[in-house]
Image (spheres, rainbow, N blue to C red):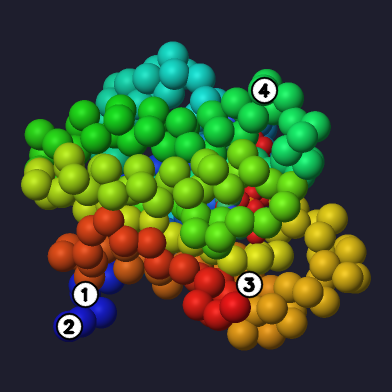
């Protein structure tokens, strides 16, 4: 009975940046819970390949490549879903990039690129999707924040500013859309084993620091995010709004 609360049968989920990495694992997890998937990324071939791979595993998956930072492309993409008869019940704003550089050397173009990709994108895609969810009176939005939604480190200032912004954007979406039946929450992953972190994983000193600093004594795996993603996408979280769940092996809780 309580398992039914976590079922996503009959729902459609758009996961941005799901052609690879954490987004792909989240999409597959939502698919395992029953959702039909819309796979996104910038590279159309990678999106199509991931959607085909998921279909071969028995999931319903379509590819929808668009740049989440380009307002006109976002608007056109959601209109394409309308034309295809796909109503987005679940939106996961996951697309993101990292850029490591001392702030003193950072150009304003680099600053804007990171803010646009990690923060403005979540506003743009959610605004278009929420326009459709609001009249239906239901919907789930999950924004992917980070450990850096609440903590800082040297060399990643725009990323940290963007991810901190995600936490309060999630609260703003709650303030405006929760009264209309839309629950918006965030997930804050810790240090995860993905392409984005390959240089850090290969750096012995950094790798030792992550393992020593994380109470769970390991990096996270993409699959570690699935439980929180399914919870926040399902009826099990119908009275949960505006929260960020850190999936970080306990790192944010401990100095
Ligand atoms: P990856 O670099 O592995 O994958 C990024 C994904 O985002 C790809 O699918 C990529 O598409 C897509 N993407 C990038 N820019 C755009 C864009 N402008 N428009 C559409 N899609 C885009 O990243 P991760 O899986 O590591 O990260 C996913 C999310 O998780 C990010 O928001 C990141 O900040 C967050 N996160 C990651 C952590 C980690 O340890 N890895 C920790 C905390 C948070 P394409 O394949 O076409 O390039």
Query: Which residue is identified by label 4?
Result: 108
Tell me if label 1 and label 3 are in contact, CB under 8 Å. no
| Badge 1 density bin: few <14, some 14–19, many ≥20, Cα 10 Å | few
Ligand 1 neighbours mark 2 (CB distance < 8 Å): no
**Residue 15 visible in image:** no
Numbered mark located on residue 1 in the image: 2
**Tag nearer the camera, 3 or 2:** 3
Which of the pair 12/168 is nearer the observer?
168
- The tag earlier along the polypeptide, 1 or 3, is 1
**Tag nearer the camera, 4 or 3:** 4
- What is the secondary structure assignment of the residue under circle 4? helix
Left or right of residue 147: residue 121 = left
- The tag earlier along the polypeptide, 3 or 2, is 2
Left or right of residue 18: residue 102 = right
Query: Which residue is identified by label 3?
Result: 220
- The tag earlier along the polypeptide, 1 or 4, is 1
**What residue sits 43% from the left and 23% below the top?**
74
Relative vertical location of residue 171 with respect to residue 120 in this rendering, above or below: below
| Badge 2 density bin: few <14, some 14–19, many ≥20, Cα 10 Å | few
Residue 175 horizontal/vertical position (percent): 18, 45
- What is the secondary structure assignment of the residue under circle 2? loop
Left or right of residue 223: residue 230 = left
Query: Which residue is identified by label 1?
Result: 4
**What residue sits 46% from the left and 31% below the top?**
120
């Amino acid at each position: 009975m309580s398992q039914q609360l976590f079922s996503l049968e009959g729902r459609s989920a758009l996961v941005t940046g799901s052609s690879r990495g954490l987004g792909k694992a989240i999409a597959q997890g939502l698919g395992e819970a029953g959702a039909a998937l819309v796979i996104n990324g910038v590279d159309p071939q990678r999106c199509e390949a991931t959607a085909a791979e998921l279909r071969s595993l028995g999931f319903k998956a379509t590819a929808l490549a668009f740049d989440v930072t380009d307002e006109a492309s976002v608007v056109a993409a959601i209109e394409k879903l309308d034309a295809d008869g796909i109503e987005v019940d679940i939106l996961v704003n996951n697309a993101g990039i990292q850029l490591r550089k001392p702030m003193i050397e950072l150009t304003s173009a680099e600053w804007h690129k990171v803010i646009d990709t990690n923060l403005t994108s979540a506003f743009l895609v959610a605004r278009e999707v929420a326009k459709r969810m609001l009249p239906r009176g239901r919907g789930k939005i999950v924004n992917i924040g980070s450990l850096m939604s609440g903590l800082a480190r040297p060399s990643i200032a725009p990323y940290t500013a963007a991810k901190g912004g995600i936490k309060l954007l999630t609260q703003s979406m709650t303030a405006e859309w929760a009264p209309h039946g839309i629950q918006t929450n965030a997930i804050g992953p810790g240090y995860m084993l993905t392409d984005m972190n390959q240089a850090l994983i290969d750096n012995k000193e950094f790798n030792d620091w992550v393992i020593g600093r994380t109470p769970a004594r390991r990096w996270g795996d993409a699959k570690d995010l699935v439980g929180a993603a399914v919870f926040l996408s399902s009826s099990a979280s119908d009275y949960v709004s505006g929260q960020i769940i850190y999936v970080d092996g306990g790192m944010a809780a401990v100095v």
